[in-house]
Amino acid sequence: MERIIDRAYRFNEEQQRALEQGEISEEEWYEINKQYFTRNYLESDNPRGQSGHSEDEYHYSLSHLMILEAINKDGSFIDVGCANGYLLESLEKWTKGLRYYNIEFHGLDISEGLIDLAIKRLPDWKDRLFIGNALYWAPEEKKYDFVCVKELSYVPINKQQSFLDHLFNNYVAPKGRLLLGSYVEKRNTNALENKLSEWDYKPTGYIEKSHHKHQLLSRRILWFDKE
Ligand SMILES: C[S@@+](CC[C@H](N)C(=O)[O-])C[C@H]1O[C@@H](n2cnc3c(N)ncnc32)[C@H](O)[C@@H]1O
């Protein structure tokens, strides 16, 4: 089980250690992160791999369909860290196919290479795919009804609380919803939820499913509604 979690987090831990020991600056942290994602994702020959998923389409769908349960009205949706846009494309296919809510999808990524690929794949969406560091980027015009970020680890640990504040205050529209996940966690630990409650973020809802690779792991999405 440790190996399933570790694979995704080992790189991040090494980055965090290097930052804390002063071997790299925060600017370099983002640059190294960006290069890591870009190189690894662009190496893949399929759209799931190009957005960081190593499994087949069946398991990809099982892991991501759960996001639909957090969408409870028509509106706009942004995937923060959208890579090649595959999640957005899949969510659009699922929402349209199920005649579910009417959602306009947007994406943001720090990697120029991945946004270039997203625009090549989804040319009609080019005005809705943005390049930027999510910690500093903010929507120019309207905020979003749904803001989805898979991980807080897109920024160093000491910036995660201000990252969450920035997303909630500057991305989420009034009556909108911030979705965190789907991320993998050891079952019944509520590790992320506990950390967030120290920052006064209490989820208004969540969804959890068991992880098909190990009985002691679960996949979770937490959401936070804005007044
Ligand atoms: C695991 S992928 C997620 C892809 C997609 N959201 C999904 O769930 O399938 C993470 C993406 O976040 C992007 N990313 C990492 N740090 C970021 C940051 N600070 N700002 C914007 N994007 C970032 C990476 O370039 C990468 O494409």
Image (cartoon, rainbow, N blue to C red):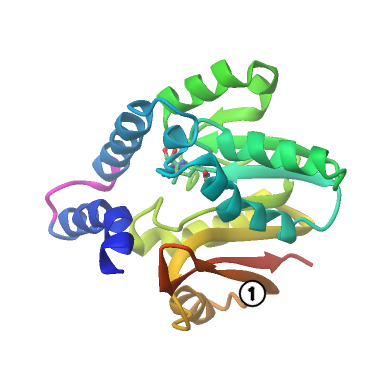
For label 1, the residue is 203
Q: Give the position of the C terminus as an image quadrant.
A: bottom right
The answer to whether residue 14 is above or below residue 133 is below
Q: Magenta segment, principal secondary structure?
A: loop
| 69 lies left or right of 152 | right
Q: Tell me the kind of residue under disc 1.
A: Pro
Judging depth in this view, the residue of 41 and 174 nearest the camera is 41
Q: Residue at x 31, y 69 (%)?
A: 1
**Residue 40 horizontal/vertical position (percent):** 31, 34
25 magenta-colored:
yes
| 187 lies left or right of 182 | left
- Quick check: is the Cβ at mark 1 less than 8 Å away from ligand 1? no
Q: Residue at x 45, y 64 (%)?
A: 184
The mark tally for this picture is 1
Segment tinted magenta in the rendering: 22-27
Judging depth in this view, the residue of 106 and 65 nearest the camera is 65
Residue 222, by quadrant, is bottom right
Q: Residue at x 60, y 36 (%)?
A: 107
**Residue 43 horizontal/vertical position (percent):** 32, 27
70 magenta-colored:
no
**Residue 190 horizontal/vertical position (percent):** 48, 80
Q: Residue at x 18, y 59 (%)?
A: 17
The answer to whether residue 86 is above or below residue 155 is above
The answer to whether residue 146 is above or below residue 213 is above
Q: Secondary structure at mark 1?
A: loop
Residue 88, by quadrant, is top right
Residue 12, by quadrant, is bottom left
Judging depth in this view, the residue of 167 and 85 nearest the camera is 85
**Residue 148 horizontal/vertical position (percent):** 61, 51
Few, some or many residues within 10 Å of mark 1 (<14, 14–19, 20+)? some
